[in-house]
Image: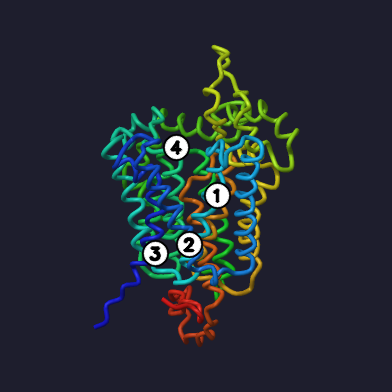
Amino acid sequence: MKLSLRFRHLLILVAILVTDSAFTRFYTNVDDDPGLRLYNYGLLGLSLWLIVRSWRWFSPGMWRWLILAVLSMAALVLESYADWGTWMVYPHVLGKLTPFLVLFGAYAYYRRYGIPPLGFVMSAVPVMVVLNIILYHPATFTLGGFLGHERGVDTTSAFLLVLPAVYFLNRYLVGNSWLFLFYFFADLGVIIFLQHRTVWLSTGLALLLNLLLVARASTTSLRLRRFLPILALPLLFGLLGGLTMVLNNPDVLKKLNNNVEDISNSESQGTGSWRLQQFEAYEPFIREYPIAGMRLKGFELPIQFFDKTSGAPVWPNYTGHHFHSFYVDRLFYFGFLGLLLAIAPIVLLVVRCLKQARPLPLDTIALVAYAGCGLLYGVSYDWPFYFFGVIGFTMAAVEVAALEPVAPPAPRPASPAAEPFFSTPTAPSRPAHASV
């Protein structure tokens, strides 16, 4: 019997995902820990090595994106030397571009070696997030914790749970195992319980994109019988379990109603109003430097957002401006050019996948849906470090899937009941010119 070692290719993806606080919390609860900084520097160095080693596997589009990102970093370094006499006077600003190296490193590796099975990683992520909460914030999974808005983990960790949720849903649609459907609902339940409202909206967008992409990938019409359990199971567990009792609690209903109102009235209540006030404070500078942003000069700009009670700056000067919104951050530091550098390829990827006639594997569809929902997540929060790696992984998965030969349609079974909903996707092989 031949032992497959293909799982080893998951190590690069795992090394990127563990940069999230849900994993690093097991090591330290200090965000600026020297060990974590050293690990991130190591990932950047590894990514550079992967890019140099596998540059021949880059598609023309990814090659152009890489050149633009490298030129942007080089221009920032040259500007620093020309105006401040040192190659990088404010590393904080350059650090907003260096995660692109992780994106291209992940792409280079998986474009060359193909996409390994994702089952282990998708199963491990929710387990580790829940374990983190149980060990360090056990009150989160209580009624009091829910009512007290105890979230347990950062928004980035809750956002990471969206990918396994979509993956498990697609595994259920492509197979006959109800276990995957249980995993989907369990993961979705944790997302809802953590009460990160931006993640709720991102999950909804991911599921919508996933449904549209699945509809295009289907070789037959979508069968209602596959979706009935998705609607019936929550109702069944609600009637037989304690969900009905919990939802009948007026405090729970009030809490859920407040969360929904915060979403629908984001400009006047909740953290959305806080973000709006921050944007209004910096809008004049975004308008003054609309094309390429303030860049390094932006770091020297005094904090423009003040506490209403004390009148003091919300953060100390020379620590960065701490924008929660990815879009505001990019517009302030790098203008529309910097924003397009980040989001244009993702928008084009989603649009291309929605329009193309060739069906995608279900695992790849989950990745594309997750990358697409990051566009909405970025409205309220900065993209986490690991998300850049997932984007690179997604780009590689889509291109590898495009290289797979199209399987001839299977003959229609005599019995309609025996007709499969989907043909089981096979693991994409390496490009014909690839070598291990």
- Along the viewing direction, whichever of 348 and 11 lies nearer the viewer: 11
Density class for disc 3 (Cα within 10 Å; few <14, some 14-19, many ≥20) is some
User: Residue 357: horizontal and vertical position, in percent?
Assistant: 63, 73
**Would residue 386 be visible to someone looking at this image?**
yes
Dot 4 alpha-carbon crowd within 10 angstroms: few under 14, some 14 to 19, many 20 or more: many
- Of discs 3 and 2, which sits in the foreground? 3
> In this picture, is 238 found above or below 368?
above
- In the rendered image, the vertical position of residue 136 relative to residue 10, given as above or below: above
Dividing the picture into quadrants, the one containing residue 280 is top right
Mark found first going from the N terminus, 2 or 4? 4
Q: Which one is nearer the viewer's eye here, 416 or 39?
A: 39
Q: Considering only order in the chain, which callout, 4 or 1, is on the residue closer to the N terminus?
A: 4
Residue 271 lies, in percent from the top left, at 54, 29
Q: In 3D space, how far apart are the residues under numbered discs 3 and 2 (Cα atoms)?
A: 23 Å
SS of the residue under disc 4: loop
Residue 403 shown left or right of residue 163 in the figure: right
Instruction: Determine which residue is flagged by label 4.
Output: 195
Does the residue at mark 1 contact the one at mark 4 (Cβ under 8 Å)? no
| Disc nearer the start of the sequence (4/3) | 3
Q: Is residue 249 left or right of residue 304?
A: left
At 61% from the left and 37% from the top, the residue drawn is 85
Task: Kindly identify the amino acid type of the residue bearing the numbered disc 3.
Answer: Leu
Looking at the rendered structure, which numbered label has been put on residue 227? 2
Asked if marks 3 and 1 touch (Cβ < 8 Å), the reply is no
Mark 2 to mark 4: distance in Å? 26 Å
- Residue at image x 53%, y 47%? 202
User: Which is nearer the N-term, disc 3 or disc 1?
Assistant: 3
Q: Which mark is residue 374?
A: 1
